[in-house]
Structures are given as structure tokens and as C-alpha cells.
């Protein structure tokens, strides 16, 4: 009986000490992976997708961009990231105002990107945007109640 209690206490002690370490390591690992892309723009849940280099490579691949288009795209995305960073750091504005300006900036960037593309690329870009918007709406739908009711109207891309 004493042996069983000793084993149970040992297992409980191991779980008590190992579980928080595993959770911290797990969270730390995912933060480290997403942080380099997210920290320049602090772009919320989508931040890991905001790195201009990675975004331009992904879009070049999906849209079949030529070198000139790719260079212009990277410039647009880099400028957008820089402006987003400034907006994020501007504590004089309310969170609502910053969010609104960030959304306007993102919309303007998307319009600039779309202007670079030929008709076929524009069609693919529009499909990509629709899929992204749908994923964002689905993601918000999984969140807490009242905020998800506003999400589709408040995110016009």
C-alpha cells in the first residue's frame, strides 16, 4: 500500500513539474516561430503571414509573377508593413481608429497589388483574397460570441 502511494505521489509530482515546462516550451516554440513575422507589424492572428519577403514569394508562385511584378509587389508589401508598424506604435489613437486605418492601408495595398497584375493574375488574386477572407470569417466564428457578429462587416477587403 505504501509502495502504491509513493508511486502515485511520484507520478503526480512528475506531472506537476513536467506539464508546465512542456506547455511553456510548446508555447515558447510557437511564439518563436510566429514572432519574427508578427512582431514587425503585430498583425494579430494573421501576423505570421505578413512578412513581406514570404508574402511576395508566395504570391509570385501562386500568381506566376514576372521579376518586375515581384519587385514592385515586394516594395508595396514592405511599405505596408512599415506603415502598419507606425500605426501600431501610435498610442495617441484609439484601438478602433488604429484598426480602421490599418484596414484602409491594407485595402489600398491590395488595390496597388491588383493594378500590377494582368487579367488572369487578377482573377487568381481575387480568388486568393476571397479564400483568405472566408478563412478569417471562419476563424472569427470560432471565437467568443459578440465579436464574431461584427467581423464580416468590419473587414472589407
Image (cartoon, grey):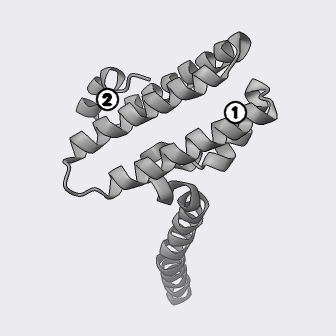
Give how far across and how far down residue 25 sits, in percent. 56, 71
Give how far across and how far down residue 114 sits, in percent. 59, 22
Determine whether label 1 and label 2 are within 8 Å by CB: no
Secondary element type, mark 2: helix
Secondary element type, mark 1: helix
Q: Could you say which disc has been placed on residue 39 in the image?
A: none
How many marks the image carries: the answer is 2
Label 2 crowd (10 A; few <14 / some 14-19 / many >=20): some
Please identify the quadrant where the C terminus is shown.
top left
Give how far across and how far down residue 76 sits, in percent. 57, 39
Residue 147 left/right relative to 123: left
Label 1 crowd (10 A; few <14 / some 14-19 / many >=20): some
Q: Quadrant of residue 64?
A: top right
Q: Label 2, on which residue?
A: 148
Taking 103 as reference, is 18 above or below it? below
Q: Earlier in the sequence, mark 1 or mark 2?
A: 1
Q: Label 1, on which residue?
A: 59
Separation of disc 1 and disc 2 at Cα? Answer: 28 Å
Which residue appears at 37% of the width and 26% of the height?
155
Tell me the mark number nearer the camera, choosing from 1 and 2.
1
Q: Quadrant of residue 129?
A: top right
Amino acid at each position: 500500500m505504501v509502495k502504491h502511494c509513493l508511486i502515485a505521489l511520484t507520478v503526480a509530482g512528475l506531472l506537476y513539474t513536467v506539464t508546465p515546462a512542456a506547455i511553456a516550451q510548446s508555447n515558447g516554440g510557437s511564439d518563436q516561430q510566429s514572432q519574427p513575422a508578427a512582431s514587425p507589424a503585430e498583425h494579430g492572428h494573421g501576423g505570421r503571414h505578413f512578412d513581406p519577403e514570404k508574402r511576395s514569394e508566395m504570391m509570385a508562385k501562386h500568381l506566376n509573377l514576372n521579376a518586375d511584378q515581384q519587385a514592385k509587389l515586394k516594395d508595396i508589401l514592405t511599405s505596408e508593413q512599415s506603415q502598419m508598424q507606425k500605426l501600431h506604435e501610435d498610442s495617441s489613437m484609439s484601438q478602433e481608429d488604429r484598426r480602421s486605418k490599418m484596414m484602409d492601408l491594407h485595402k489600398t495595398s491590395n488595390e496597388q497589388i491588383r493594378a500590377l497584375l494582368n487579367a488572369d493574375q487578377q482573377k487568381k488574386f481575387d480568388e486568393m483574397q476571397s479564400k483568405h477572407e472566408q478563412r478569417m470569417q471562419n476563424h472569427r466564428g470560432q471565437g467568443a460570441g459578440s465579436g464574431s457578429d461584427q467581423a464580416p462587416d468590419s473587414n472589407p477587403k
